[in-house]
Image (cartoon, grey):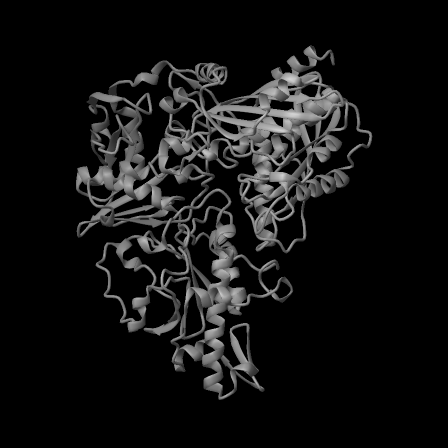
Amino acid sequence: MLKLPKENAASQPSSLGRRGFLIAAAGTGFTLAFLRADSSLAAGKKPQAPAAAPAATAFDPTIWYDIDRDGTVTVNIAKAEMGQHIGTALARIVADELEADWSKVRLHYVDSDPKWGLMVTGGSWSVWQNFETLSRAGAAGRIALIEEGARLLRVPVAACSAKLGVVHGRGRSIGYGEIVRRGKLGRQYTPQQLKALVLKTPQQRSLVGHTVQALDVPSKTDGTAIYGIDAEIEGMVYARPKIPPTRYGAKVLSIDDTAAKKIRGYLKSEALDDPSGTVPGWVLVYAETYAAASRAAGLVQVKWRAGAAAHVSEQDILHYAGKQIADPTLGARVVDDEGVEQAFADASSSLERQYTTATVLHFQLEPVNAVAQQIDGVWHIHAGTQWQSLTLPVLAKALQVPESQVLLHTYLLGGGFGRRLNGDYCVPAALGAKAIGRPVKMILSRADDARFDSPRSPSVQHLRMAFDGAGKVTAMHHDASAGWPTQAMVPAFLSKDKQGHPYDPFAIAGADHWYTVGAQRVRAISNDLANSTFRPGWLRSVGPGWTNWAVESFIDEAAQALKVDPLDFRLSLLQGTGRNAGSAPNAVGGASRLAAVLLRAADKAGWGKAMPKDTGLGIAATFGQERDMPTWTACVARVRVDRSTCMVQVEKLTMVIDAGTIVDPDGALAQAEGGALWGVSMAIHEGTAFLNGEVRDTNLNSYTPLRMADVPQLDIEFVNSNEASTGMGEPPTTVVAPAIANAIVAAVGARVRHLPIRPEAVLKGLDKYGAV
């Protein structure tokens, strides 16, 4: 039997409804909209007939939660849970306005269904996009319960209030559960009425911004939480793939499974026929157990005809990017002020630098996996995914069925970090189940996972800055070439510049910074060679993982050229004027808020004080992934460099973050700590390279993330703010690498311009700058 999770994982709730919002008693509980997805489908059973609903459901309301007859509040979470406690964060938004008893709040991670609208978890969007909607849903429920509670208590509504799941009035009280059992709930709201609801002030909140127990922690610690890799269906077989030598264009020439037939439990091996083009050249090895499938896969011999990328290397990709940047006709001008050329022509001096980054893998703890089964013409796919709305149409194309015949059951994710935005791993499981006529559970080994990853693309960036005779910045030009994940996987999400040229906003965001630099130009170029060699992916920090590396390193180099303090130089450019002034609701205060976190971080870290020999402080700032959702973040890195080995030790990170209203303090801190440590990992430890069309490192013996012994001290502070909540996923990751690089300069005078920072690059910098 399928082990059904108490917490499945998912995506993003839709709006408050096209025609209104209904609160009504349905069946045995109090529900705000559709009934929850019937999980019996996942167990291979026919769905039960839905409970009779009031005629008023014709208003097509949107569901966020329901209240059982015992007062238990179940909040439907349409986002994926991958360790960031998103269920707790979203549930407390609802529960705070609902005035629910937190001890009676439960989470339900929904399965895919068109009613949820766009289902995606990424980009630090979850709280930011849902805070107001869920707040109003909670407030609407509280009002309806107070009104019905007042009727049952025979007390005027104006004399009643709610607290901790109980309506009180004139010395009498009634719990939400009893109201559901005895009441006649039928309150309806128009969109206009919902918008007019008066929400709590920050001072009135009891859950948002306060420390409470995360609802998902107990199951994760006692082992009852169910991840995608835990899903089991009676009668299923296991599969492990044989992955071809190139991501695209590979073709199976022959399969020899003679040796594999000696493995007990081995069934067969066959090439997949994939109409979607997701897994060309794949062979699945089937067996009764995963151990047998894994052993047999090692014995099956496959001959392929490789695709065109079979001889492509990392250096080929970087060299190609350099040639692209040298061609001014390529790319899209994301920012394009008038007067850039004239400013450089008139400049008294200028600065020009190039920065590069290597390929980065996700290496999430749980390798990608999926279970596929067909029931009564409907394909049920069980997996941990971040972007159901992207995966569903691909699965439909692969299976050659309408999208309505595919249902994704989304589980807890043992790490996502953007890898599971691309649900490509669901396709071979589905095709395998279709081919063999039985449910199939496909699990990739860690090496398979690395080879099939959608990595962060290598990048090349060229930056220029112009100065007048007084040292004032008059222009800045930023060119960036990299593989574009959005172009590869969801072209409809591409943006266009003023001339109509498309660009991937997730591959250039961060270059459109908040510094006032005179005439500014930002050009984004798609690296065609990268795109055709591998499938570029979104990885935590996304575009700013490389753009902010270049911007904040370059700002430091400009300060050095002008012989001014890097902090003072940044503050002089954070003028908060023009497009950098900020706007409501998300960017109130603009560049001035970035200046504030810089000042606070510098003060906490002891900026300007004498450091021990070969130890230095470096500073950097970021606004996160997107200008319309800025999370103002500053980081000071304290770094020591061993001159004999050129090894870099990060001793401490001091970070100050202004993310507006913090919904879940403990969750936000965990996000910041994890993000900061991944920032260290990608700065000086992680990174691979393409060789002959494949990544060089396929396991953790050669791909070496940050180890526990190298974890620095962390001092993270959040600004106390009542502004709009923004995202926490990317900013703490993005800001770390440039802070470390800038600290290396302060420590020993060596400038590094490539990620990851290797000892040989530090040594080269020491030699070049005469710092030995």
For residue 739, side relative to residue 47 (left or right)? right
- The residue nearer to you, when weighing 64 against 643, is 64
364 over 7 or under it: above or below = above
Residue 344, image x and y in percent? 63, 19
Residue 236, image x and y in percent? 24, 45
The image quarter containing residue 50 is: bottom left
Q: Residue extending furthest bottom?
A: 154
103 over 604 or under it: above or below = below
732 over 47 or under it: above or below = above
For residue 29, side relative to residue 480 (left or right)? left
Residue 27, image x and y in percent? 32, 73
Q: Residue extending furthest right?
A: 610
- The residue nearer to you, when weighing 633 against 760, is 633
For residue 748, side relative to residue 535 (left or right)? right
* Residue 686 visible in this rendered orientation of the protein: no
The residue shown at (33%, 25%) is: 247
* Residue 515 visible in this rendered orientation of the protein: yes
How many labels sit on residues?
0
For residue 576, side relative to residue 663 (left or right)? right
The residue shown at (51%, 54%) is: 217
Residue 200, image x and y in percent? 58, 66
Quarter of the rendering occupied by the C terminus: top right
